[in-house]
Amino acid sequence: MFSIGEFSKITGLTVKTLRFYHEQGVLKPSHVDPGTGYRYYAPELIDYARVISSLRELEFSLSDISAILNQADDDSDILEFLSSHRQEIAAQLERYNQITNSLDVIIRKEEEARSLMGKINYDIEEKQLEPILVAGIRMKGRYSECGKAFSKIGRKFGRHICDKPLMLHYDSEYREDDANFEPCMPIRRGDSVDGIDVHELRGGRCISLIHQGPYEELGRSYERVFGYLRDQNYEFEMPTREVYIKGPGMIFRGNPKKYLTEIQVVLKS
């Protein structure tokens, strides 16, 4: 028989691993000296140890390995174990792909916001908007209820969403409990479904102002926008738009003082 050190060199398993396998009942030594506690392994356990190593490389758990060793001595005997394990690994890979995609979205959004923070012009601008396709849910109620709508649109159109979320405001005044608004997501393509209306927002010349700070303080930026419209004798169309460049994160609520919202008011042509 081989000492545990010799058996370790033969099988490529560390002494610590062999002791652990013994404790778990997966690979028991042929003999344990009652006086010294030294472990000894018979030659026939070498193949047994190599089978365990091969299964561990395939990410089988020790409990599965014990079940396999008790039932099989050939690859054909463990076909069901192999098929079942492959399905589990495939499911894990799919889950990891989903997590990777979610991380990519969070990282991209925050990198864009960080880059934009250093370039923002907080002055009123006149610019041209291109037509965009959006998926939106028209609502009446409190503005704070928009989160559910954004979540629903995100679930339905996930991979087709191509830009920042925005809100369309159809009221010409602030309304507390019965506001008329539409949370939207720009999308590459898609059809109306399940209460979500897919439609095109027309382009045109607009007045734009980026507001930094909590949503509750948007009023001071609207004051600047409407003052500019009055001074220029501009007429505008409803709905007005709010584009949420940076808001609450997907993990943390974040600091409202760093929220970035672009107010867009499309001028009458």
Image: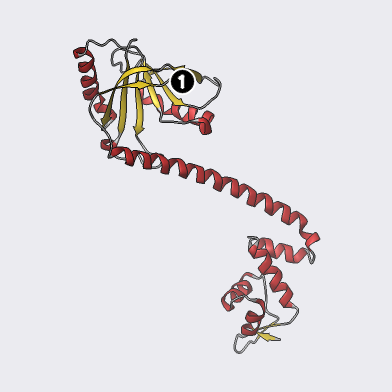
| Residue 193 quadrant | top right
Side (left or right) of 91 relative to 231: right
Side (left or right) of 22 relative to 124: right
Q: Residue at x 64, y 84 (%)?
A: 6
Q: Residue at x 32, y 37 (%)?
A: 116
Depth check: give the residue in front, 51 or 68. Answer: 51
Side (left or right) of 108 relative to 99: left
Residue 46 lies, with reference to residue 57, above or below; the image says below
Q: Amino acid at mark 1?
A: Ile
How has the structure been colored for display?
secondary structure
User: x, y (%) of residue 175?
Assistant: 30, 16
Q: Which element is circle 1 on?
A: loop
| Residue 121 quadrant | top left
Q: Residues within 10 Å of mark 1 (few under 14, many from 20)?
A: many
Q: Residue at x 55, y 46 (%)?
A: 97
Q: Residue at x 33, y 41 (%)?
A: 115
Q: Which residue is mark 1?
A: 137
Depth check: give the residue in front, 20 or 165. Answer: 165
Residue 89 lies, with reference to residue 162, above or below; the image says below
User: x, y (%) of residue 200?
Assistant: 47, 18
| Residue 77 quadrant | bottom right
